[in-house]
Amino acid sequence: MRTARLGRITDGGVIAILRGVDADDAVAVADAVVDGGVTALEVTADTPNAMSSIEAISDRVDDALVGAGTVLDSETARAAQLAGAEFLVTPTVNLEIIRTANRYGTPIAVGAYTPTEALEAYQAGADAVKVFPAKTGGPDHVAAIGGPLPQIPLIPTGGVGGENAGAYVRAGAVAVGVGGSIVDHEAIDDGAYDRIEANARAVVEAVSAARD
């Protein structure tokens, strides 16, 4: 199951990040993102009522995985798992969180920026490394990490959108994490979920084109 979930993330190639989305809007946003072709959704743990949003999306959205991001400790990791999170994402290397994910069979992408951090996370049991913040080094930085460490699946996150997602994939990323470029809070306020769907589709199409 753990391998299958990771495979769904890498096959789809895009994780849409829902940060600061009200629980009342979470399912509608998730539906719009999925309609745009995204198959993995991450609700950040620093969002108010994040566990409620994870549970609601998990119960009502069938065509995508829902996970928890910005997980900073093992207690939050376990709460997210119990709420229905099907994968976990961290911004930093935290061995306790990796152990919690492994203990309960939940795939985890661990935040790292250097080759040393990436290898430490992978050897500790991370399924993938979230290269974060990606915008600091760009696609060249992702390629530089992947060169000596081709065995580690890399998921750049932070400053990734439709305009550069393809460049990250060509640099070796197995998927990209995308927040504001998809989940536009102004669109949510306006009830313009079609804009969110269009944002999602643009990133999915950029990733697909880069893989061809």
Image (tube, rainbow, N blue to C red):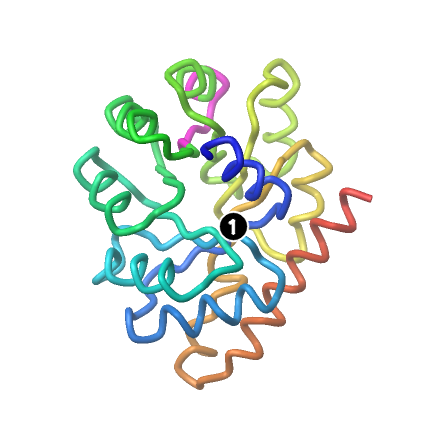
Q: Give the range drawn in magenta.
A: 110-117
Hey, which residue is sitting farthest left in the picture? Answer: 75
Going 59% across and 69% down the picture, which residue do you hit?
Answer: 35
Question: Is 82 or 150 nearer to us in this picture?
Answer: 82
> Does residue 200 appear left or right of residue 45 in this picture?
right
Q: In this view, does 16 lie above or below 141?
A: below
Task: Determine which residue is flagged by label 1.
Answer: 15
**At which x and y percent is residue 121?**
40, 21
Residue 146 in the image: x percent, y percent? 62, 23
Q: What residue type is labelled 1?
A: Ile
Q: Does the magenta stretch include residue 113?
A: yes
Picture coordinates of residue 187 (x, y %)? Answer: 47, 78
Looking at the picture, tell me which residue is in the foreground, 61 or 75: 61
Residue 175 horizontal side relative to residue 71, left or right: right
Query: Picture coordinates of residue 37 (x, y %)?
Result: 62, 61
List the single residue furthest toward the bottom: 190
Residue for point 37% across, 34% down: 106
Report whether 202 appears left or right of 55.
Answer: right
Please tell me whether residue 152 belongs to the stretch shown in magenta: no
Quadrant in the rendering for residue 100: top left
Residue 195 lies left or right of residue 116; in this view the side is right
